[in-house]
Amino acid sequence: MIKRIVSLFFLLIFSSVLLFGQEIITAERYLEIVSEQFAAIRDFEGNITIRSGNVDMIGVVNYLSPSFLRIDFTRPAEQVIVFNGEMLTVFLPDIRALLTQNISQAARRGAGAQGLSLLRRNYVPSFVTGPNPEPLDGASGERVVRLRLTRRSAAEGFREIILSINPETRLIRRMEGRTIADSEVRFDFTNIRINQGIPEQRFIYDAPALANTYHNFLFRASD
């Protein structure tokens, strides 16, 4: 489960969390606008809920351009995901495990500059029902514009990704990824605040001394 969550979140962090501009002509143009404007975002913070299967995780997310990320969870309490631009760290308090992953220099150089081009290159965009807002959840009063991203090749881990955009704030309210095994990972973002002057020091994490450390849990690090 943690690998699916990390994989989808990295797609999000190396893409964009905002939609700017009013020009909506095609789904492809929609993505292009997001990519062009993402460079203006220095940082953001807010609340996040992650659902994987029947499990909900709740926390506070911080992001600093080009690729600093931190999530401090309240459910499960004390769980943390941190990326400091060089190393991904995940602390799992239930089993006192500290998972780390070194990210290659090539990946670090390309991540911030590529922006939404990762999704544009690997997925085909289309509107779920069109560019007009629709309810987020059934009879919910909250309305969003939904964009479906369908993978171009079987090499992608997510068969499709659906972005739900708040048409008034132009924030990505929800991101849903469906795997080839038909399991789903969902991110909900609320109370997002951009350009708050977040310092790099916020992404320094002091792990508990008694945690068992497992290095390169996603893949073998290489340049």
Image (cartoon, rainbow, N blue to C red):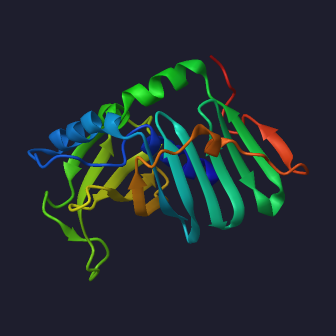
Image quadrant assignment for residue 68 = top right
Residue in the foreground of this view, choosing between 178 and 12: 12
Image quadrant assignment for residue 104 = top right
Residue at the extreme right of the image, as rendered: 210
- In the image, is 95 to the left or to the right of 200? right
Q: Residue drawn 78% across and 60% down?
A: 93
Q: Quadrant of the N terminus?
A: bottom right
Can you say whether 50 is above or below 41 in the image? Answer: below
The x and y percentages for residue 145 are 22, 60
- In the image, is 58 to the left or to the right of 20? right
Can you say whether 36 is above or below 193 in the image? Answer: above
The x and y percentages for residue 43 are 45, 44
Q: Residue drawn 81% across and 51% down?
A: 97
- Residue 13 visible in the displayed image: yes
Residue in the foreground of this view, choosing between 146 and 32: 32
The x and y percentages for residue 40 are 32, 37
Q: Quadrant of the C terminus?
A: top right
- In the image, is 2 to the left or to the right of 121? right
Q: Residue drawn 29% across and 71% down?
A: 136
Image quadrant assignment for residue 123 = top left
Q: Residue drawn 30% across and 47% down?
A: 149
Residue in the foreground of this view, choosing between 170 and 197: 197
- Residue 152 visible in the displayed image: no
Can you say whether 199 is above or below 54 in the image? Answer: above
The x and y percentages for residue 6 are 57, 47
